[in-house]
Amino acid sequence: EKGGWSSFMVKEITEQPEAVAKTLLGRAVDGEVHLQELEAIGADALKDVERIVIVGAGTANYSGLLAKYAIEAWTRIPVEVELSHEFRYRDPILTPNTLVVSISQSGETMDTLMAVKYASENGARTLSICNTQGATIPRESDAVVYTHAGPEVAVASTKAFVAQVVALYLLGLHLATVRGSMSAAAIADVVEDLQQLPEQMETVLKQHETITQLAGWMADTRSVLFLGRHVGFPVALEGALKLKEIAYIHAEGFAAGELKHGPIALIEPGVPVFVVVPSPRDPDSLHKKVVSNIQEIRARGARVLVIAEQGDAAVLPYADVVIPVPLASKFMEPLLAVIPLQIFALELASAKGLDVDQPRNLAKSVTVE
Ligand code: M6R
């Protein structure tokens, strides 16, 4: 079933353009977004949603953290993202106008299932984003939007992550449509951005060999840090999780703005730090701020590995390695930036001779609490 690939993980990383295209299929058409699946909740109920709470664990939690930026921007509905295993133990505030969105590749994660049951029992509406047809979590939810990433076998989630983010973006655009929070032209622009993603992802995948070399040089690394800001922050968290789970290397993701509030103390000569850099076209000048973070860590001897937009000259003087990604809009950038980090984890684990598909101590689906 690996179809000639050396691991399921490499196969699944390579399948990401297709996972995105299939998740968009029939849902984003002619510049509009329609999720028929949401009829189970009803247009009136969707108009009345006052708050969205996204629950998930691990990578699913990070896809929620990422999509929060876009859903809030597009719908102006407040979005909270919570680890599913924390949710029901803190007496969360739920009303019929709270939409609890659960995210799960397997649809069987016990922590997430219990969060969904708790949300239903306490009067919230529930929607599941799931990659496995007919799984328990969608069955327990009022509605389900399936990601069509295809079966994901490797323990480390890759294509399911990007498909989850795309499904959440579609949810945001559907809500924006029924609530009138975005113009038709603005929605059409985002649909176009989404439709360009598969091709842009193919471009990023072409850098696999370069990243393999980088990982090969770093096979003895003990610890790697990841920095990102705005939508780059969840990407940093995801890059660190991948490295922990399959390469057994200590890794931490930080919001770049948090550096001087503590983590910069970890920077010593030779420490590898991946930095996800926002586009220099960014109107909020976050690019400048992240470049100044890079200068700060570089001045302390960090080995700086930068993921930046193609042609970003500002990072060149301070980076040991630059991995370019194609020009994309703000909310699409993270879906490109995550790919080099997935490949890096895969290749570093391979360089250490580890089984990338079945890392120690982990199961693909965590069906116990
Ligand atoms: O099947 P789920 O999406 O509910 O699984 C959630 C997490 O267990 C999962 O994402 C885990 O963190 C992955 N191994 C990450 O690569």
Image (cartoon, rainbow, N blue to C red):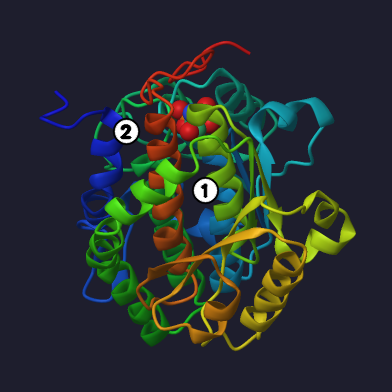
Instruction: Report crowding for label 1: few under 14, some 14 to 19, many 20 or more residues within 10 A (C-alpha).
Output: many
Can the viewer see residue 167 in this picture? no
Check disc 1 and report its element: helix, strand or loop: helix
Q: Quadrant of the N terminus?
A: top left
Q: Name the residue under label 1.
A: 63
366 over 291 or under it: above or below: above
Please give the label number shown on residue 55. Answer: none
Picture coordinates of residue 42 (x, y %)? 44, 52
When asked about the image quadrant of residue 191, the answer is bottom left
Q: In which quarter of the image is the C terminus?
A: top right
Work out whether residue 87 or residue 43 is closer to the camera in this orientation and state it.
87
346 over 245 or under it: above or below: below
Identity of the residue drawn at 23% across and 60% down: 202
Asked if residue 253 lies left or right of residue 64, the reply is: right
Instruction: Report crowding for label 2: few under 14, some 14 to 19, many 20 or more residues within 10 A (C-alpha).
Output: many
Picture coordinates of residue 218 (x, y %)? 50, 43
What's under tag 2, amino acid-wise?
Answer: Met
Identity of the residue drawn at 20% across and 57% down: 26
When asked about the image quadrant of residue 21, the answer is bottom left
What's under tag 1, amino acid-wise?
Answer: Ser
Extreme residue toward the left, this view: 3
Work out whether residue 243 or residue 25 is closer to the camera in this orientation and state it.
243
Can the viewer see residue 305 in this picture? yes
Picture coordinates of residue 175 (x, y %)? 48, 64
- For the residues labelled 1 and 2, the Cα–Cα distance comes to 18 Å
Q: Mark 2 points at which residue?
A: 9
Check disc 2 and report its element: helix, strand or loop: helix
Work out whether residue 11 or residue 43 is closer to the camera in this orientation and state it.
11
Picture coordinates of residue 137 (x, y %)? 46, 26
Identity of the residue drawn at 28% across and 52% down: 209
Question: Is mark 1 in CB contact (under 8 Å) with mark 2?
Answer: no
